[in-house]
Every structure is written in C-alpha cells, then in structure tokens.
C-alpha cells in the first residue's frame, strides 16, 4: 500500500482575489457613463467619490491588462 501524499498548501487570500479584480476590470464598461450621472442626480454630489474611485481603479486595471 502506498503512503498518502501531503496536501498542498492552500492559496492565500491575495492569490484568490487577484484574478477577480482583473475580471472585474474587464467587465466594467460604458455603463458607468450612464449610471454615475444618474446616481449623482438622485443622491447629490456626496456620492461622486464612488465614481472617482471606480473610474480610477478601472483605468489602472485596464492599462495593466
């Protein structure tokens, strides 16, 4: 009978989240151009920081891909 082999090390949280950020960057499209002006008109300029953060992340992710 053969000896059981060792289990591989589990992947880290960073390794499992990394590919999802790439897919998220690819999935974001021109919908932001429609969604963010609508959200700002409904909720005011206090929410515009979310659009700036999202667009900035999308820019850097798409330039890396």
Image (cartoon, rainbow, N blue to C red):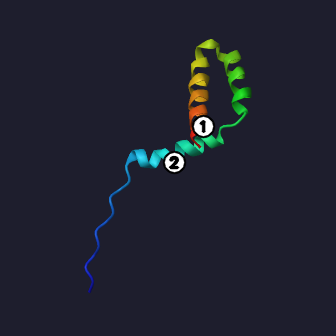
At 59% across and 18% down in the image, what residue appears? 47
Indicate whether 24 appears above or below 53: below
Indicate whether 13 appears above or below 36: below
Disc 1 secondary structure class: helix
At 67% across and 21% down in the image, what residue appears? 39
Where in the figure is residue 28, as x and y percent of width and height?
A: 65, 38
Where in the figure is residue 31, as x and y percent of width and height?
A: 72, 33
Q: Nearer the viewer, mark 1 or mark 2?
A: 1
Indicate whether 19 appears above or below 31: below
Location of residue 62 (image quadrant): top right
Disc marking residue 63: 1
Location of residue 6 (image quadrant): bottom left
First of labels 1, 2 by sequence position: 2
Viewer-nearest residue: 14 or 43: 14
Where in the figure is residue 23, as x and y percent of width and height?
A: 59, 45
Farthest residue toward the top?
45
- In this rendering, position of residue 15 left or right of residue 9: right
Disc marking residue 19: 2
Q: Whole-Å distance between the Cαs marked 1 and 2? A: 15 Å
At 61% across and 18% down in the image, what residue appears? 48
């Amino acid at each position: 009978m053969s000896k059981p082999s060792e289990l591989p090390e589990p992947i880290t949280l960073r390794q499992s989240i990394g590919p999802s950020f790439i897919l998220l960057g690819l999935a974001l499209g021109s919908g932001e151009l429609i969604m963010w002006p609508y959200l700002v008109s409904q909720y005011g300029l206090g929410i515009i920081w979310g659009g700036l953060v999202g667009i900035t992340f999308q820019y850097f992710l798409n330039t890396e891909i």
